[in-house]
């Protein structure tokens, strides 16, 4: 029997155990959800990490992959957590979420492999747990979709634009290829969140736009601050409407 991904600290075991646990979660197996998933490397508060080298340096590219591995790991674990914590959710939603969880696992695997190809290992730098700390066991399913797929992953669409601009300054290589694959596929993950957010709001007869604005305000204290300019084009492609985009722009401006 495979190990509980959330209770396993070794990165390779997390990756190798994921598919089996996702399958079992779909069948309704119960898994322990810890306050914090296990880690085998140092965790530092976000914003207090060592300075980064530029992407023209191999170490800078390795650091980028390490940071992305941390983000993809938390995204993978959060998707798995949702799968486990909402066993009675719509069957199609759960099946799509299971596929998304495995996709995050593939992104993590790509980052770790790319990191090793550059001569570095997982754990060379400390990590943060800001994504995991943004959710709560008290979340409704709509809350969880908003936080993980529309806010956290949506913010990744915004930061991806600046990364692509930085990539244009270095020769094409494996790190660039990995980041482009992840960037393209993350758009699908955010679209998933947009579609199901509206579907569940509709089922509960909630005004989705009004709910979006309220959630931004109510959940802000536990959400990571987003400072990148809102990528309006990608947000639209990820099925954000004009009202939601304006709320995000206003939020960013209020935090500057």
Image (tube, rainbow, N blue to C red):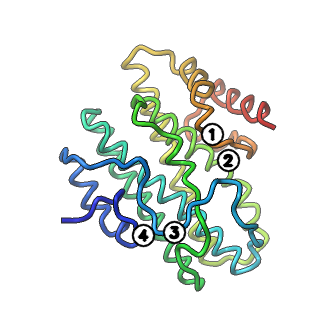
Per the image, label 1 sits on a secondary structure element best described as helix
Residue under numbered circle 4 = 11
| 243 is higher (above) or lower (below) than 54 | above
The answer to which of marks 1 and 2 sits earlier in the sequence is: 2
* Image quadrant containing the N terminus: bottom left
Per the image, label 4 sits on a secondary structure element best described as helix
Q: Residue at x 57, y 30 (%)?
A: 219
- State yes or no: discs 1 and 2 in contact (Cβ < 8 Å): yes
- State yes or no: discs 2 and 3 in contact (Cβ < 8 Å): no
**Separation of disc 4 and disc 2 at Cα?**
27 Å
Front: mark 4 or 3: 3
The location of residue 96, given as percent across then percent down, is 34, 45
Per the image, label 3 sits on a secondary structure element best described as loop
| 216 is higher (above) or lower (below) than 5 | above
Front: mark 1 or 3: 3
**Separation of disc 4 and disc 3 at Cα?**
10 Å
* Image quadrant containing the C terminus: top right
The answer to which of marks 4 and 3 sits earlier in the sequence is: 4
Per the image, label 2 sits on a secondary structure element best described as helix
Residue under numbered circle 3 = 41
Instruction: Out of 123 and 160, give the one closest to the viewer.
Output: 123
The answer to which of marks 4 and 2 sits earlier in the sequence is: 4
Residue under numbered circle 1 = 235
The location of residue 248, given as percent across then percent down, is 68, 32
Front: mark 4 or 1: 4
- State yes or no: discs 1 and 3 in contact (Cβ < 8 Å): no
| 139 is higher (above) or lower (below) than 6 | above
Residue under numbered circle 2 = 158
């Amino acid at each position: 029997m495979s190990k509980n991904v959330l209770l396993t600290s070794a990165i390779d075991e997390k990756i190798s155990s994921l598919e089996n646990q996702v399958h079992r979660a779909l069948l309704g197996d119960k898994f322990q959800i810890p306050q914090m998933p296990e880690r085998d490397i140092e965790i530092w508060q976000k914003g207090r990490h060592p300075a980064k080298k530029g992407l023209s340096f191999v170490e800078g590219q390795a650091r980028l992959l390490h940071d992305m591995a941390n983000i993809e790991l938390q995204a993978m674990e959060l998707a798995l957590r949702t799968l486990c914590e909402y066993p009675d959710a719509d069957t199609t939603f759960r099946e799509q979420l299971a596929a998304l969880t495995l996709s995050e696992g593939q992104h993590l695997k790509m980052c770790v492999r790319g990191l090793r190809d550059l001569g570095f290992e997982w754990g060379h730098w400390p990590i943060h747990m800001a994504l995991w700390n943004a959710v709560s066991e008290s979340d409704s399913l709509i809350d969880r979709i908003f936080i993980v797929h529309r806010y956290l992953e949506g913010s990744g669409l915004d930061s991806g634009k600046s990364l692509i601009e930085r990539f244009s300054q270095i020769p094409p290589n494996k790190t660039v290829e990995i980041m482009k694959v992840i960037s393209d596929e993350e758009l699908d993950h955010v679209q998933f969140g947009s579609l199901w957010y509206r579907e569940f709001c509709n089922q509960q007869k909630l005004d989705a736009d009004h709910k979006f604005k309220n959630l931004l305000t109510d959940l802000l204290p536990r959400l990571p601050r987003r400072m990148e300019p809102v990528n309006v084009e990608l947000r639209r492609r990820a099925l954000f409407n004009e009202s939601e985009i304006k709320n995000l722009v206003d939020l960013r401006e209020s935090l500057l």
